[in-house]
Image: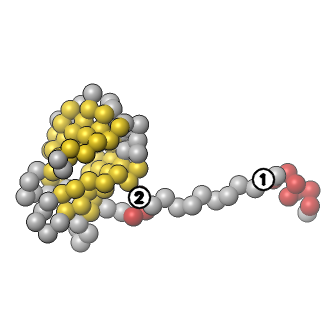
Amino acid sequence: MAVRIEPIPETVRVRISGDIETVLSVPYEDDDRFLVGLSDGTLLVGSYDDNLRCKFDVARDGAGIIQFDNGAAVINWKVEWATVSAYNATMVELPDPTPMPLFPYLENLMN
């Protein structure tokens, strides 16, 4: 089944319908962006303009196929839970992983 996430006009709330049926309030801070996380691994960034119009962008793809339909995000996959949070750049921009040594046993021999 699919999940549809759509902003409720002129409010800071989103309606989620499909596998999950709920309305979630968007935490509103100085930044007009927020995050929507889904159980399939999808992470969306929502943003509001001055007229409280909302649009979604993909921060990280999950297992589902994401489509945008008239301001709403549709995720074609089984979704068990969804959460909304304030925007945090550390969630969107992953740090570079620490490189692994190619031959760790050689480092011990050289000392």
Nearer the N terminus, badge 2 or badge 1? Answer: 2
Q: Is residue 81 left or right of residue 101?
A: left
Callout 1 amino acid = Leu
Residue furthest toward the bottom? 30
Identify the residue shown where x is 31% and y is 34%.
76
Q: Quadrant of residue 32?
A: bottom left
Closest to the observer: 54 or 100? Answer: 54
Q: CA distance from mark 2 to mark 1?
A: 29 Å
User: Which x, y percent locates residue 110?
Assistant: 92, 61
Q: Is residue 14 left or right of residue 108?
A: left
Residue 24 seen in the current view = no
- For the residue labelled by badge 1, is the local secondary structure a helix, a strand or a loop? loop
User: Which x, y percent locates residue 111?
Assistant: 91, 63
Residue 30 seen in the current view = yes
* Above-or-below relation of 73 to 26: above
Residue furthest toward the left? 10
Q: Which residue is mark 2?
A: 92
Q: Quadrant of residue 53?
A: bottom left
Identify the residue shown where x is 82% and y is 52%.
103
Residue 102 is tagged as 1
Identify the residue shown where x is 81% and y is 53%.
104
